[in-house]
Image (cartoon, grey):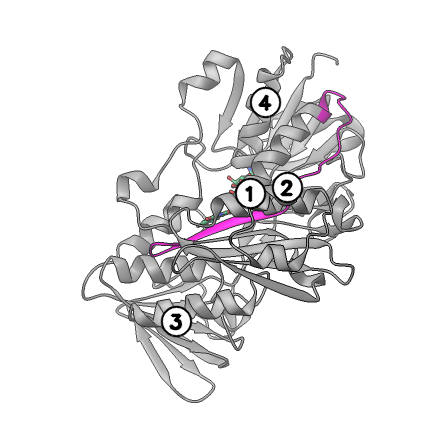
Amino acid sequence: MDDRGIVIVGAGEAGVRAAFALREKGYEGSVTLIGDEPHLPYERPPLSKPVSEAEAVRAIVAGERFAETGIAFKRGQRVAALRPSEHQLVLEDGEALGYRRLLLATGATPRQLPIMSACGVLASDRIHVLRTVEHAAAIRRYMGEGKRIGIIGGGFIGLELAAMGRMLGAAVTLIEVQPRVLMRGVPEKLALALQVRHAAEGVELICGVAINAISADSDSVVVTLGDARRIEADILVVGIGAQPNTALAAEAGLAIENGIAVDAQLRTSDPDIFAAGDCCSFPVAIYGARRVRLESWRNAQEQGSLAAANMRGAGEMFVGIPWFWSDQYDLTLQVAGLADGAVREVARSLSPGAEILFHLDGEGRLIAASGLGPGGAVARDIRLAEMLIAKAAKPDPGALADPAVKLKSLL
Ligand SMILES: Cc1cc2nc3c(=O)[nH]c(=O)nc-3n(C[C@H](O)[C@H](O)[C@H](O)COP(=O)(O)OP(=O)(O)OC[C@H]3O[C@@H](n4cnc5c(N)ncnc54)[C@H](O)[C@@H]3O)c2cc1C
């Protein structure tokens, strides 16, 4: 390595993990972490969970760790351009930095509804998305008794916010244009169980309707639905997914394919530039190298670590199994693997109110498992299912369904 060292763009989960993993693995060259947010790096999952305001901002690392480990942290600075042929990047203020190896960990940006610009409400302070601490603080102001929250999107962020709103006493209406919530990546049975729970908690859930118009003034926001219903709220949160931050990479000529395209070692189309976390798409070995992009906390961590090793030439393959969790009320949902190639579903009841679904492909191979239950009820079995998925196991469906058979014995 020459003295230009390693530069990481994006001080979120993946970028921070990569920076510290470099030091943990004994790299003594220069490490520079650049993030455009003004804060110390923080965890995003608590932003949509009903924790106290103080707990909602949880640092990924204590600030002093940067000086202690000799990681140069440039915060509140945006990288404006990459010049791969010169091994250089340029900050927004014009400063140029050289690198030997570069990691792009630029994350993702919430999508906006096209109808918002058509209705001229893009700039309304009554309408929000949720990605940053600033977004979370703006939304939290409306999370109490006597407030009305409208949510568009029945994905994880929308549902977690709905639960948080109800737990803090607000009236919540959630609008999903699809026929049910969590259409992507969660089996119908568990998604419907969550819908039932939200309804029981008092969330007004409206599925399968078009959104015809959105208007806002200084006091409220109104969503007009395809069936002419009007939903009025104090605040509207749009949670319809996020798009990968690929502009830097695309302008520098790197390959883009639903995210910055990387190979199994997380290397982009430029051999000295790697990418990790929400911003990249990568091939998943156990699904025949199918290319996916994940927005999940553990994936960002695992890829940050692996990119750190591979920027130093380890040449290791990414073998992580897709996994995420979502907390709503006292329930936790966990999904491991990709269930969309499944032809058979086998259910196993755990404790009361806790169930795991195993998803098998046409050859009887376990390709995914999804579980829903109170607290940590499904965590252990999902972990064991992950190990079965990683081994491409073909467990007996009868044994999977029988809670008396320990999953460990099937490994
Ligand atoms: C509200 C919320 C709740 C979540 N809850 C869960 C959960 O319960 N379970 C789960 O598995 N996952 C959850 N996630 C997803 C998880 O937090 C993300 O997958 C993870 O944070 C992604 O990390 P990342 O480092 O790839 O991206 P990010 O954390 O987005 O970090 C990227 C950083 O790069 C910065 N950046 C971008 N471009 C530039 C540039 N040009 N110059 C400098 N800096 C730049 C961005 O501003 C950002 O700070 C949640 C996400 C959110 C938003």
Q: In the image, which residues are magenta?
A: 310-331
- 319 part of magenta stretch: yes
Labelled disc at residue 387:
2
Decide: marks 2, 1 in contact (CB < 8 A)? yes
Dot 4, crowdedness within 10 Å: few (<14), some or many (≥20)? some
Q: Nearer the viewer, mark 4 or mark 3?
A: 3
Q: Which residue is mark 1?
A: 383
Decide: marks 4, 3 in contact (CB < 8 A)? no
- Residue positioned 68% across, 49% down in the render: 259
Q: Which residue is mark 3?
A: 196
Q: Nearer the viewer, mark 4 or mark 2?
A: 2
**Of the residues shown, which amino acid type is indicated by label 3?**
Val
Residue 124 versus residue 47: which sits nearer the camera?
47
Q: Decide if residue 219 is on the left or right side of residue 123.
A: left
| Helix, strand or loop under label 1 | helix
Looking at marks 4 and 3 on the same chain, the residue that comes earlier in the sequence is marked by 4
Labelled disc at residue 73:
none
